[in-house]
Image (cartoon, rainbow, N blue to C red):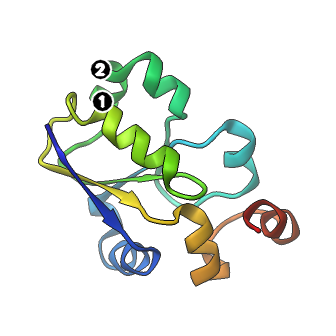
């Protein structure tokens, strides 16, 4: 069973800037949310209902040798996803992005890809 740690938006952005290749970012939001605003680069899209339906299969699709960070809009669903996968994970730890992508948007507007006006309505 893995230990789940919270990571702030600033810590996440700093770590990603230094070690993006060593991170497995798992976005658990719904499809329309994912299409609206997303982190650029390598992100594994695994919506929460898919995780609920197939925990073992989803756990097997995640590279637990990397720093696994679960993300959603505000941090609730990503925490739930991490907890659901805790018994199936093959690593020691995973991270939940505290405050979710909303915290990323507040920290640095230029980090997310998507329509700026739509993102402002989505996050605020």
> Callout 1 environment at 10 Å: few (<14), some (14 to 19), or many (20+)?
some
Residue at 56%, 73% in the rendered image: 104
Q: Is residue 33 left or right of residue 47?
A: right
Measuring from the top left, give residue 41's x and y in whole percent: 51, 60
> Callout 2 environment at 10 Å: few (<14), some (14 to 19), or many (20+)?
some
Residue 56: mark in rendering: 2
Residue at 26%, 42% in the rendered image: 63
Can residue 40 be seen here? The reply is: no
Image height check: is 92 above or below 98?
A: above
Residue at 13%, 37% in the rendered image: 1
Judged from the image, the secondary structure of the residue bearing numbered disc 1 is helix
Residue 59: mark in rendering: 1
Measuring from the top left, give residue 27's x and y in whole percent: 51, 47
Q: Are marks 1 and 2 in contact (CB under 8 Å)?
A: yes
Front residue of 8/31: it is: 8
Q: Is residue 22 left or right of residue 81?
A: left
Q: Is residue 98 left or right of residue 1?
A: right
Image height check: is 31 above or below 6?
A: above
Front residue of 113/51: it is: 51
Judged from the image, the secondary structure of the residue bearing numbered disc 2 is helix
Measuring from the top left, give residue 45's x and y in whole percent: 52, 40
Residue at 14%, 43% in the rendered image: 91
Splitting the image into 4 quarters, where does residue 114 fall? bottom right
Residue 26: mark in rendering: none
Splitting the image into 4 quarters, where does residue 124 fall? bottom right
Q: Residue furthest right?
A: 117
């Amino acid at each position: 069973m893995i230990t789940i740690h919270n990571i702030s938006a600033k810590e996440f952005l700093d770590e990603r800037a230094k070690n993006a290749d060593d991170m497995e970012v798992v976005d658990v939001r719904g499809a329309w949310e994912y299409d609206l605003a997303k982190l650029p680069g390598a992100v594994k899209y695994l919506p929460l209902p898919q995780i609920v339906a197939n925990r073992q299969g989803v756990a097997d699709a995640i590279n637990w040798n990397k720093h696994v960070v679960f993300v959603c809009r505000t941090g609730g669903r990503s925490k739930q996803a991490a907890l659901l996968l805790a018994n199936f994970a093959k690593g020691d730890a995973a991270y939940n992005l505290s405050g979710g992508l909303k915290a990323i948007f507040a920290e640095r507007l230029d980090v997310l890809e998507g329509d700026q006006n739509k993102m402002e309505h989505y996050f605020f």
